[in-house]
Amino acid sequence: GDSVTQMQGQVTLSEDDFLFINCTYSTTWYPTLFWYVQYPGEGPQLLLKVTTANNKGISRGFEATYDKGTTSFHLQKASVQESDSAVYYCVLGTNSAGNKLTFGIGTRVLVRP
Amino acid sequence: EAAVTQSPRNKVTVTGGNVTLSCRQTNSHNYMYWYRQDTGHGLRLIHYSYGAGNLQIGDVPDGYKATRTTQEDFFLLLELASPSQTSLYFCASRTGFSGNTLYFGEGSRLIVV
């Protein structure tokens, strides 16, 4: 079945630091790749979507790219702010039975002022 | 604006108790999902549905039942609650296409003592 591996459990940064989170995925279906963000006390919300057609997505200063050769996709931001403190999930979407989304375990990002 | 509303937001019950978590979406979406969120596991799919009267089994269904009474309403039932079901539960909805955004509710925190 589909799977997503997201390795970093927690990342602690200072403001203006560079953020990089990497995920790998496995599927036999055509993939759509997402990054969701969850702020404290809220449900997850879509941050970025990357398709194999465009290979890249940009939103709110974040950039997500995809590498078909290594079946990996990552999220980066050049200069984080305290307001970026949240949990970030990489998510795999396919047209497999049920159109389910497969979530990574999440990376908690803490940005210190 | 897409909307998914969950109730109750917080619930405490005893082992063996009966709990129903409710979810209503006003997005006219076909698909609705129930996830549980636990530290170290991210979001795990319990059950989902692609329309009224339909139910599909997710990845961690044991101990849970669900029912989709209308396109708007999806319920998660714990008939004999156990401490292992203490968790934060999220409902979500989206259209059927795998590339479409998943919209989450704010979550229901359940504690089983």
Image (spheres, helix red, strand yellow):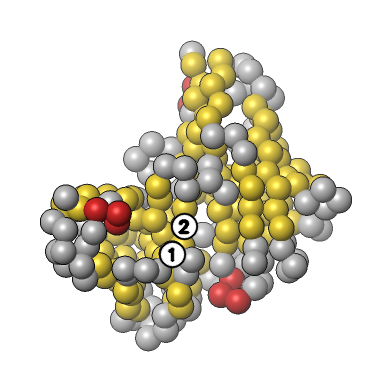
In the rendered view, tell whether residue B37 sits above or below residue B56: above
Label 1 or label 2, whichever lies nearer to me, is: 1
Residue B41 position, x and y percent, is: 47, 48
Residue B90 position, x and y percent, is: 37, 56
- The residue at the point 62 percent across, 16 percent down is A16
Identify the disc placed on residue B60.
1
* Residue A42 in which image quadrant: top left
Badge 1 amino acid: Val
- The residue at the point 37 percent across, 68 percent down is B62
User: Camera-side residue: A22 or B91?
Assistant: A22
Q: State the SS at label 2.
A: strand
Query: Same subunit under labels 1 and 2?
Result: yes
In the displayed structure, does residue A24 sit left or right of residue B104?
right
User: Camera-side residue: B54 or B15?
Assistant: B15
Residue A81 makes an appearance in the image: no
Q: What whole-number distance in Å separates the C-alpha atoms at marks 1 and 2?
A: 7 Å
- Tell me the subunit letter for badge 2: B
Quarter of the figure that contains the N terminus of chain A:
bottom right
Residue A73 position, x and y percent, is: 73, 45
In the displayed structure, does residue B46 sit left or right of residue A4?
left
- The residue at the point 49 percent across, 37 percent down is A87
In the displayed structure, does residue A101 sit left or right of residue A86?
right
Disc 1, disc 2: CB below 8 Å?
A: yes
- Tell me the subunit letter for badge 1: B
User: Camera-side residue: A76 or A2?
Assistant: A2
Label 1 crowding class (10 Å Cα cut-off): few <14, some 14-19, many 20+? few
